[in-house]
Amino acid sequence: MRLIIGWEVTEYTNLLTESRVQAIDRMSKQAEETGADGVIGVRFENAAGKNGESQILAYGTAVKLK
């Protein structure tokens, strides 16, 4: 993540990275609980709220291998 002037805010970048990893872990766990073997076509969406908060949505297709 970079500010308009080009400086990187490393704390914010690290927080977003950690949040994506957590989202993948949660998605993988949910897929496993439904009997899936994995998740394909994973996508991320980021949204910023009015008060500066950020949301990360991860989604994909749970698959069962033969």
Image (spheres, grey):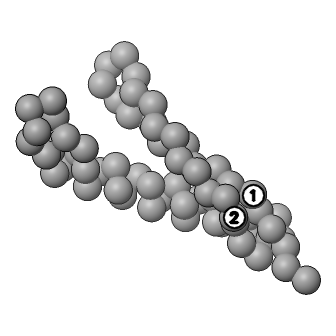
Q: Quadrant of residue 31?
A: bottom right
Quadrant where the C terminus sits is bottom right
Q: Nearer the viewer, residue 16 or 3?
A: 3
In the structure shown, which secondary structural element does the residue marked by tag 2 occupy? Answer: strand
Q: In the rendered structure, are the residues bearing label 1 and label 2 in contact, judged by CB atoms less than 8 Å apart? A: yes
Percent across and percent down for residue 12 are: 23, 45
Percent across and percent down for residue 19 are: 41, 52
At x 75%, y 57%, the residue is 61
In the structure shown, which secondary structural element does the residue marked by tag 1 occupy? Answer: strand
Give the residue type that dot 1 points to: Thr
Quadrant where the N terminus sits is top left
Sequence-wise, the earlier of marks 1 and 2 is 2
Q: Quadrant of residue 57?
A: top right
Q: Is residue 38 left or right of residue 24?
A: right
Give the residue type that dot 2 points to: Ile
At x 84%, y 73%, the residue is 64
Residue 2, labelled with which disc?
none
Percent across and percent down for residue 18 are: 36, 58
Q: CA distance from mark 1 to mark 2?
A: 5 Å
Q: Nearer the viewer, residue 62 or 27?
A: 62
Residue pointed to by mark 2: 40
Percent across and percent down for residue 46 are: 46, 37
Residue 61, labelled with which disc?
1
